[in-house]
Amino acid sequence: MVKSDDLRVKRTRKLISQAFFTLLRKKKFEKISIQEIADSAMINRATFYAHYADKQDLYDSLIDQFLASFTGILDEQNLVDGNNVHVKEIETVLSRFYEFVQDKPEVAQMITDRAHDQRLKNRFLEILSERYTELFEKLEVREKDVVVPNDFVISYISSILVGTLDWWVSSSTQMSARDFAHLIIKLISNGHLTVLGVNINREN
């Protein structure tokens, strides 16, 4: 593999990514060939393989970039304080995330198209687990005196995020990112989080 910090490498990878995104607008991931990506990027197959091991490697790289940006947005605000969840801050972050998605719809479409990919699910779980371990460790969700595992709770919340992202990407809604974020937070904070025993802080 070539060194990723070389300017020419970055330029070539950008061409490959753009070509891949263009193809994704026309067909599903599984139907796209390496040759099609190379032709669209106006490079040869050898150049593609100098940067990526295969199509899955390209996909994983783009997803990692997307999730890194998602993680960066999460880290900018103090969303959780012990067992308290600051709803206003989360709404602000979610609004920025949907605005980010609007600017990168192809990557978001990749996520929703392959929402059942276990590796993708695991990455979302890792991100949420790493950042909210303290919160989830304090929660003890029970159903008829049986403690519900925290990994189930995190997986449940992740599925909500992926499901709403799917709708946001595929719908023709005129709802702004801010209004959509407000709706999602209103639904979650008035139901899901309260049921889980989370203290909701609605103050600015």
Image (tube, rainbow, N blue to C red):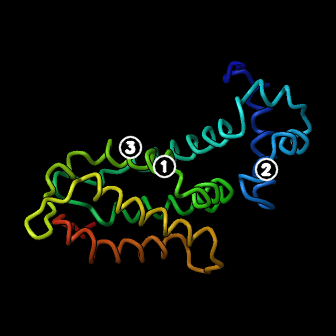
Estimate the spatial distance between the alpha carbons at disc 2 and disc 3, rounded to whole Å.
29 Å
Residue type (three-letter) at the residue carrying disc 3? Glu
From the top left corner, tell me how far across and down residue 131 is, in percent: 32, 45
Density class for disc 1 (Cα within 10 Å; few <14, some 14-19, many ≥20) is: few
Q: Secondary structure at mark 2?
A: loop
Return the residue at label 1.
Answer: 118
Return the residue at label 2.
Answer: 32
Marks 2 and 3: which is nearer the front? 2
Return the residue at label 3.
Answer: 126
Q: In the displayed structure, does residue 76 sit left or right of residue 190? A: right
Q: Secondary structure at mark 3?
A: helix
Q: Secondary structure at mark 1?
A: helix
| 37, above or below 50, in the image | below
Quarter containing the C terminus: bottom left
Q: What residue is shown at x 86% (from left), y 31% (from top)?
A: 45
Residue type (three-letter) at the residue carrying disc 2? Ile
Q: What residue is shown at x 81% (from left), y 40% (from top)?
A: 34
Q: In the displayed structure, does residue 30 sit left or right of residue 128? A: right
Estimate the spatial distance between the alpha carbons at disc 1 and disc 2, rounded to whole Å.
21 Å
Snapshot quadrant of residue 189: bottom left
From the top left corner, tell me how far across and down residue 182 is, in percent: 41, 74
Estimate the spatial distance between the alpha carbons at disc 3 and disc 1, rounded to whole Å.
12 Å
